[in-house]
Image: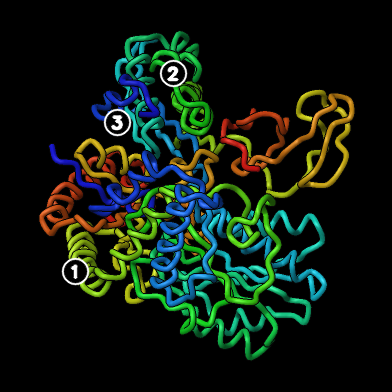
Amino acid sequence: MKRIYLDHIAAAPLAPGVFEKMRPFLEAEFGNPQSLHSDGQAAAEAVAEARERVSALIGANPGEVIFTASGTEANNLAIKGLVQAQRARGNHLVVSAIEHASVLNAAKTLEKSGFQTTVVPVDGDGRIDPAAVAGALRKETVLVSVMTANSEVGTIEPIAEIVREAKAQAPGVLVHTDAVAAAGNIPLDVKALGVDALSLSGNVFYGPKGSAALFLKKGTKLAPLVEGGIQEGGRRGGTEDVAAIVGMGEAARLAAEAMSDRVVRITALRDRLIEGLLRSVGHVRLTGSPGRRLPYHASFCVEFVEGEALLLSLDFKGIAASSFSACTSKSLKVSHVLLAMGLDHTLAQGSLIFSLIDSTTAADIDVLLNVFPPVVERLRNMSPLYTEFLKETGR
Amino acid sequence: MIYSDKVMDHFQNPRNVGTLPDADGVGQVGNPVCGDMMTFYVKVKGDKLTDVKFQTFGCGAAIAVSSMVSEMAIGKTVEEAMEITNEKVAEELGGLPKNKMHCSNLGADALHAALDNYKARTAGTASGPTVVPEHDHKAPGKMPDHCPYCDGPVEGLADMCSCKKCDLDLVECGHCHLYTNKAETNCTHCGAQLDR
């Protein structure tokens, strides 16, 4: 049975050619980029080239890119590093209710050392209202952190508008955006967005795991999280992971090159999936914005059944997907994103996400559309909630 | 795979799924908020369970547990069936992940609710099903009055409290909101992995 992988939000494969670019730096070209000899300088040149490619992907200057080991690290560095450096100016930050745990937990930790956080709500589509962000600003606000796109529901946020309104209200405020789910998959330009900092992760655009970066606008002060040598301009100590950085650079180059074609192609497949799925099974809701969503992202809540049971059933049929139901999380907590969007617990338990990768085909989508209805039917026939629903509606 | 082959078998091919319109007892446990909900139907002849059927809303473990319980109960006397415990069911399934031991492992409770219901109907004290709404859950962000281990006083704030007598820091579980020793990886009440 051919496996059909529709879990881009969890992990993506390497783009063809990326591993070949990385390999020499795990073998013969093992030098430390900080060394002055030619072995070191060869590695330094490779890192510099990768930095150029990653910065080009988001319209930044190479000097504005700090490599990290994960999107989570980039978010932590942005949140903690920026507010610590701005401490004298104020102690308040603004985040949205649907941010990734790396943003929300970093903000929570800062609260223990005297910072205050305002959490801005979202609407039923998971959209952050720019006016609500501007309305949450105080004179002591030093940082706003709102995500570019949400990986659970796919909604793309109006970042440029949020930045514009926030900076009109408080010119000195810094804006960070967690663009991990978006970067390399939709066109992003840090100048057009107007952000001061942006997190991105290589694996989401078919680079290696363990490769990520923080864009930090030139001249912005940052307190390092990891202190050490002068790597990354003293903003992140530790010997560079040259192979991962080179892999991310190559993936960024390929992503920029493929961007416009890929967006069109993957969006068409996504729409085929969404329309087909909603047509073939009743009582399934699309979550997130129908129009402003990530090209690779199709997320749903399936009524009367639970997400983990859906995942396991699909896995048996060779299909990999995701869910954010309570039972799929180790801490048994239902998705904070779905609850923030106003969904009730029962509906949120039926969370199911299909996220397409570059090699997904129309035939893959059609296999899913064939497999899905009987999977749901089997679980609904076991569900007391469905029996109750049928009784109530007189069927 | 997080589950044993036996769990996956019962999930894929659950035994005794369905309802019994002429059931002698009906019991329900769980709550969709918790993630799992089970309804059990029993048919009793003489003192023996001649048929058991169930319906379950929940994860793979919850479905497998229900199926296993139904299999274990059929043919037993009411008395014997009352002795089936959640732990025995988990054991029979070749074990369950820690965080599935509580919320998903409610099959025996659901069976017992159906048997209680049967007894109540026989005694003429019930007509509808017996419903056990859910296991222990507390409101979030409320520090416990007493230490869950020694019942002694708890000091501190909701997100940073401790028991002096046990010399333990206590942490709130994100799922059931009860408090557990901070050194644990899983909540001792519901089994959910603790967030830090």
To which residue does mark 2 refer?
B95
Could you give the CA–CA distance between mark 3 and mark 2, rounded to whole angstroms?
29 Å
To which residue does mark 1 refer?
A265
Asked if B132 appears above or below A292 in the picture, the reply is: above
- The chain that hosts pointer 1 is A
Asked if A101 appears above or below B55 in the picture, the reply is: below
Q: What percent of the width, then of the height, locates residue A357?
A: 26, 56
Same-chain check, marks 3 and 2: yes
Q: What percent of the width, then of the height, locates residue A373?
A: 19, 50
Q: What percent of the width, then of the height, locates residue A33?
A: 51, 52
> Which quadrant of the view contains residue B196?
top right
To which residue does mark 3 refer?
B20
Single out the residue that lies furthest toward the front. A37
Q: Of residues A133 and A24, which is closer to you in this image?
A: A24
Could you give the CA–CA distance between mark 1 and mark 3, rounded to whole angstroms?
50 Å
Number of labels in the image equals: 3
Give the crowd class for mark 1: few <14, some 14-19, many >=20 residues within 10 Å: some
| Secondary structure found at label 1 | helix
| Secondary structure found at label 3 | loop
Q: Of residues A148 and A49, which is closer to you in this image?
A: A49
- The chain that hosts pointer 2 is B
